[in-house]
Image: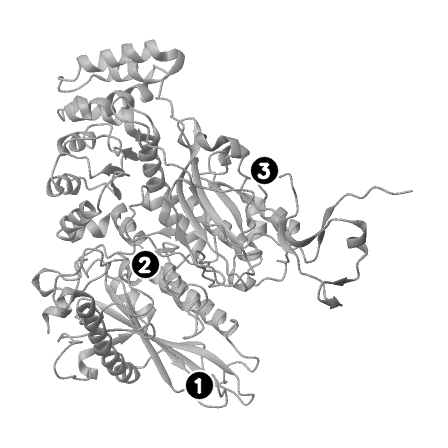
């Protein structure tokens, strides 16, 4: 009797997880969780080690959550979320601002290099919420615990995830409440399988090419039904049988399990739409209402408008306003509608504080066409003493940058100012103009933590954000008495890899420009310690070598905090370094930023990574470094005659000595402890051979003055060659003129002028 047979797919390979990932930062806005930043990390088509799988993915989740949760980042994140509410909210005079769905590329692993796998960076698209996007990008791209970096690419806000993909997984980070950030991982297993159409085919013991050969099959999703729920880190590791217990930094899973709640399914509804719900992402949003309290709101608005011409408001009226349950929402809605009509009276100032002050922060970014006099009024008055930080949108203010900065400079109690720009701006120039005004007031920069979202926006487009020259023959626009470190000159000792028995054959030289990073001494020291601990040998850079520079722009605010702990304060990405291509147009010579002249007001750090060979023909690495500056005469990098630095004109110190000069308030014992920790980490790092370092070599040491002077001569010689290569590359792309093409993302016009 014939038996029934149901055709099926027979697995021919192991089960695997997603090979590429898309990360969404979402927040509850206008009734739904909406995207505010999207970043992708595309996996390699043939090498799993080059992809975010297993523990490295979990480390990205932990890092992103750590960054968004850091108290120092919360004010800027909240300010951009306030702009996101306006961006997505349908107002009376503008349509809904909701992006259309954007599909991720359809990729297949094991098919070799695909044309769409490595997409170019978009240098033109302006990011709506650049600070949030920079947080997410750095969280994915760089893990300071392991030093691992990965390829990343910012994506449009309309990007959506499809669970039918054989390539992509998704991570959602819910930042609605930055004091309780949530996350979730979504990914479905795939395997190779071949179709078995009949019982005869099932019993076949050989393939079409003969005995012992079986077709590998095609890649398919294991499950036909996908439940719309996210996984915690441990669930993800368990689902795909991934090991993490013996990982060098194996506490990310436990950290996420203990601290971070899982994101809800509602947080994924727009970024992971059902096939029949594609229109949802572009659906209109509802206008803000106050529900059953609308009558109270209207009465309140009528009351405050009768006082709009008054010089001040009596405390009894303020108490009466506060007694209304919806007073804050009603005041905010009214002021947003008529902010351009405010006169800047003391009454306006007090009402603005009632509407937009939360604890010690004043959030004015939603007020358009507001005059600096209103800002002054809001920061003045008997109940304003608690306000120590402020956020404001500089694209819509009706005053000049000079007027606004002058008003803010008069408030000595301010400790944080966040300058934002509108999501649909056309350029980041307003941030540059504001910084030029701030640079003329170094005391203000020294005393106040300044955030300019335009700096993050320019870096996300891989463009310079500050001018490369300054007035009065200064080496940079950012004042050196506030941001004292100009640059890092770094070299990696190289070997002949074809014959490991040979000694090192020379150095690869590079530079790191810090003049656009706006790092004060304590913050620089924290980033520098992470930089040294994660510095990879030359030629051994994994994934994205430039992402290692995120050690400066996403690190603890003080060297007293261990970089492995849950602390990651965000500061401007090193835009010049980030904007330059990896290589010059010849495709071989590595590119670095222009090396500036060294002046007595600023410091240059020299870092040398040395190779050490042992009897087994294997090698280990150590690091020597020093902070150097001329005592009297400027050291000219492009001088017609190369004059080696002399010892009597060169000051040489280590990190502790540098901080004792520029930031003596920092406890030197903390610095020493952190230096020892970094040295221990270098001694035990993955680049140390089984034989270890020679007994007479320290993992990390400071150059002696004589060694520093000799090494600096080599650095300057290399810097002159680098600057000449930059000059030639610019001339090649500009036809020999100083006028660069509009699509040029980097330019040093001063190098062409010196010709």
Disc 1 and disc 3 in contact, CB within 8 angstroms: no
Of the residues tagged 3 and 2, which is closer to the observer?
A: 3
Q: Mark 1 points at which residue?
A: 496
Quadrant hosting residue 156: top left
Quadrant of image for the C terminus:
bottom left
- Residue occupying image coordinates x 14% and y 62%: 469
Quadrant hosting residue 623: bottom left
Gap between marks 2 and 1 measured at Cα: 39 Å
Question: Which numbered disc, 2 or 1, marks the residue that appears first in the sequence?
Answer: 1
Crowding at mark 3 (Cα within 10 Å: few <14, some 14-19, many 20+): some
What SS does tag 2 mark?
Answer: helix
The answer to whether 29 appears left or right of 318 in the picture is right
Residue 359 shows in this picture: no
In the rendered image of this protein, does residue 131 appear above or below residue 322?
below
Counting from the top left corner in percent of width and height, residue 546 is at: 37, 63
Quadrant of image for the N terminus:
top right
Counting from the top left corner in percent of width and height, residue 359 is at: 34, 32
In the rendered image of this protein, does residue 218 appear above or below residue 223?
below
Residue 540 shows in this picture: yes
Q: Mark 3 points at which residue?
A: 229
Identify the mark at residue 522; answer none if there is no mark: 2
Counting from the top left corner in percent of width and height, residue 658 is at: 29, 68
* Residue in front for this viewpoint, 156 or 535: 156
Question: Which numbered disc, 1 or 3, marks the residue that appears first in the sequence?
Answer: 3
What SS does tag 3 mark?
Answer: loop
Crowding at mark 1 (Cα within 10 Å: few <14, some 14-19, many 20+): few
In the rendered image of this protein, does residue 245 appear above or below residue 9?
below
């Amino acid at each position: 009797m014939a038996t029934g047979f149901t055709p099926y797919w027979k697995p021919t390979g192991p089960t695997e997880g997603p090979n590429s990932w898309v990360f969404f930062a979402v927040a509850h806005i206008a009734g739904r969780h909406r995207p505010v930043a999207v970043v992708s990390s595309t996996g390699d088509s043939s090498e799993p080690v080059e992809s975010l799988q297993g523990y490295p993915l979990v480390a990205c989740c932990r890092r992103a959550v750590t960054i968004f949760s850091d108290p120092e980042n919360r004010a800027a994140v909240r300010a951009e979320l306030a702009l996101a509410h306006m961006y997505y909210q349908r107002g009376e005079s503008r349509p809904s601002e909701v992006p259309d769905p954007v599909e991720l590329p359809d990729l297949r692993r094991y098919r070799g290099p695909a044309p769409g796998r490595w997409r170019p960076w978009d240098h033109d698209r302006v990011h709506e919420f650049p600070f949030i996007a920079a947080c997410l990008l750095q969280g994915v791209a760089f893990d300071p615990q392991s030093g691992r970096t990965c390829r990343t690419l910012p994506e449009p806000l309309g990007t959506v995830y499809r669970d039918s993909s054989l390539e992509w997984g998704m991570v959602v980070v819910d930042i609605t409440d930055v004091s309780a950030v949530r996350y979730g991982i979504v990914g479905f297993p795939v395997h190779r399988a071949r179709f078995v159409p009949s019982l005869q085919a099932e019993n076949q013991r050989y393939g079409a090419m003969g005995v012992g050969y079986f077709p590998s099959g095609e890649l398919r999703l294991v499950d036909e039904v996908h439940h719309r729920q996210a996984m915690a880190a441990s669930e993800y590791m368990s689902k795909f049988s991934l090991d993490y217990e013996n990982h060098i930094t194996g506490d990310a899973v436990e950290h996420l399990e203990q601290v971070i709640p899982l994101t809800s399914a509602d947080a994924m509804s727009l970024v992971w739409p059902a096939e029949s719900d594609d229109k949802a992402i572009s659906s209109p949003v509802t206008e803000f209402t106050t529900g059953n309290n609308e009558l109270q709101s209207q009465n309140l608005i009528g009351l405050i408008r009768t006082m709009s011409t008054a010089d001040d408001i009596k405390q009894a009226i303020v108490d009466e306003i506060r007694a209304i349950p919806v007073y804050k929402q009603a005041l905010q809605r009214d002021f947003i509608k008529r902010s351009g009509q405010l006169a800047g009276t003391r009454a306006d100032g007090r009402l603005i504080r009632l509407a937009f002050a939360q604890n010690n922060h004043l959030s004015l970014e939603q007020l358009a066409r507001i005059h600096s006099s209103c800002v002054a009024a809001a920061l003045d008055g008997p109940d304003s003493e608690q306000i120590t930080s402020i956020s404001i949108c500089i694209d819509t203010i009706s005053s000049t940058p000079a007027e606004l900065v002058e008003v803010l400079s008069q408030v000595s109690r301010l400790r944080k100012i966040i300058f934002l720009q509108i999501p649909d701006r056309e350029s980041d120039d307003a941030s540059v103009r504001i910084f030029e005004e701030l640079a003329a007031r170094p005391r203000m920069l020294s005393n106040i933590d300044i955030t300019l979202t335009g700096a993050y926006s320019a870096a996300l487009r891989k463009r310079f954000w500050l001018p490369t020259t300054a007035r009065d023959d200064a080496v940079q626009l950012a004042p050196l008495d506030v941001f004292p470190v100009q640059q890092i000159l770094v070299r990696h000792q190289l070997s002949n890899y074809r014959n490991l028995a040979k000694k090192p054959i020379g150095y690869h030289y590079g530079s790191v420009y810090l003049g656009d990073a706006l790092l004060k001494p304590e913050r620089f020291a924290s980033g520098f310690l992470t930089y040294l601990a994660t510095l990879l040998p030359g030629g051994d850079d994994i994934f994205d070598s430039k992402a290692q520079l995120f050690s400066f722009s996403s690190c603890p605010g003080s060297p007293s905090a261990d970089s492995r702990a849950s602390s990651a304060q965000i500061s401007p990405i090193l835009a010049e370094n980030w904007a330059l291509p990896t290589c010059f147009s010849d495709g071989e010579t590595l590119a670095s930023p222009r090396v500036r002249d060294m002046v007595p007001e600023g410091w240059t750090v020299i870092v040398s990574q040395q190779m050490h060979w042992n009897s087994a023909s294997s090698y280990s690495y150590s690091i020597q470094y020093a902070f150097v500056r001329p005592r009297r005469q400027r050291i000219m990098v492009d001088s017609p005659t190369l004059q080696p630095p002399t010892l009597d004109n060169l000051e040489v110190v280590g990190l502790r000595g540098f901080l004792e000069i520029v930031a003596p308030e920092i406890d030197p014992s903390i610095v020493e402890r952190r230096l020892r920790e970094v040295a221990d980490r270098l001694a035990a790092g993955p680049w140390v051979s089984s034989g270890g370092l020679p007994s007479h070599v320290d993992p990390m040491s400071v150059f002696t003055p004589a060694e520093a002077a000799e090494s600096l001569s080599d650095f300057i010689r290399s810097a002159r060659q680098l600057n000449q290569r930059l000059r030639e590359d610019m001339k090649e792309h500009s036809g020999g003129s100083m006028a660069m093409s509009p699509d040029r993302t980097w330019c040093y016009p001063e190098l062409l002028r010196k010709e």
